Amino acid sequence: MKRYFFDFAGQKIPIRRDEATEFYEVDEEGNINRKPLVMLLGDGSWVLEGREFYLNRLGKRVRYEVVHVEYEVELHQPRGLYGQLRRRALVKAVPDWQEIDVAVKEALREQG
């Protein structure tokens, strides 16, 4: 990937879009898919443990919960002061409200 820089006080600083939040899916057994589910460039400060969100992939919505977040700051120059934030989030698929509604109705029918 080509990186773009701007000059500040004689230092080449990577442009902010190099900041990334990477989402990795974890299954019920705790196995982590090593290929990111999705990567977001820019601000990912909303990615917090326990937060739920929908991923809409070509019209298919899946609800996920963030189960763990790891932060890493990368310095791009040996003597520079400027770095970029890399956020890695483990997420698991969780039922959405429609799925929960259907399951509750089925359970009530079976009891009735």
Image (spheres, rainbow, N blue to C red):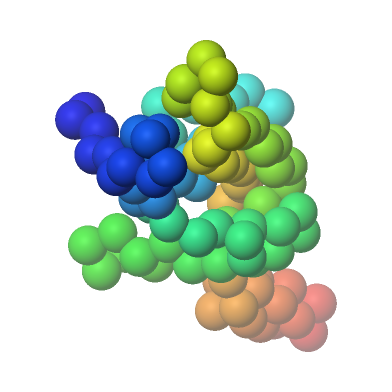
Q: Is residue 75 left or right of residue 70?
A: left
Q: Is residue 99 left or right of residue 14?
A: right
For residue 102, say whether it is visible.
Answer: no
Circle count: 0
| Residue 27, image x, y percentages | 61, 34
Q: Which quadrant would residue 71 be assigned to in this image?
A: top right
Identify which residue is drawn at 29% across, 44% down.
6
Q: Is residue 31 left or right of residue 17?
A: right
* Above-or-below relation of 1 to 39: above
* Above-or-below relation of 27 to 110: above
Q: Nearer the viewer, residue 8 or 77?
A: 8
Quadrant where the N terminus is found in the figure: top left
Q: Is residue 102 left or right of residue 68?
A: left
* Above-or-below relation of 104 to 25: below
State the residue lying farthest toward the top.
Answer: 78
State the residue lying farthest toward the right.
Answer: 111
Q: Which quadrant would residue 101 be assigned to in this image?
A: bottom right
| Residue 38, image x, y percentages | 39, 45
For residue 108, say whether it is visible.
Answer: yes
Q: Nearer the viewer, residue 109 or 2?
A: 2
Q: Nearer the viewer, residue 92 or 90?
A: 90
| Residue 29, image x, y percentages | 70, 27
Identify which residue is drawn at 73% across, 42% down.
68
Quadrant where the C terminus is found in the figure: bottom right
| Residue 18, image x, y percentages | 37, 42
Q: Nearer the viewer, residue 2 or 22?
A: 2
Identify which residue is drawn at 62% across, 61% down.
45
Identify which residue is drawn at 50% across, 46% down.
21
* Above-or-below relation of 35 to 69: above
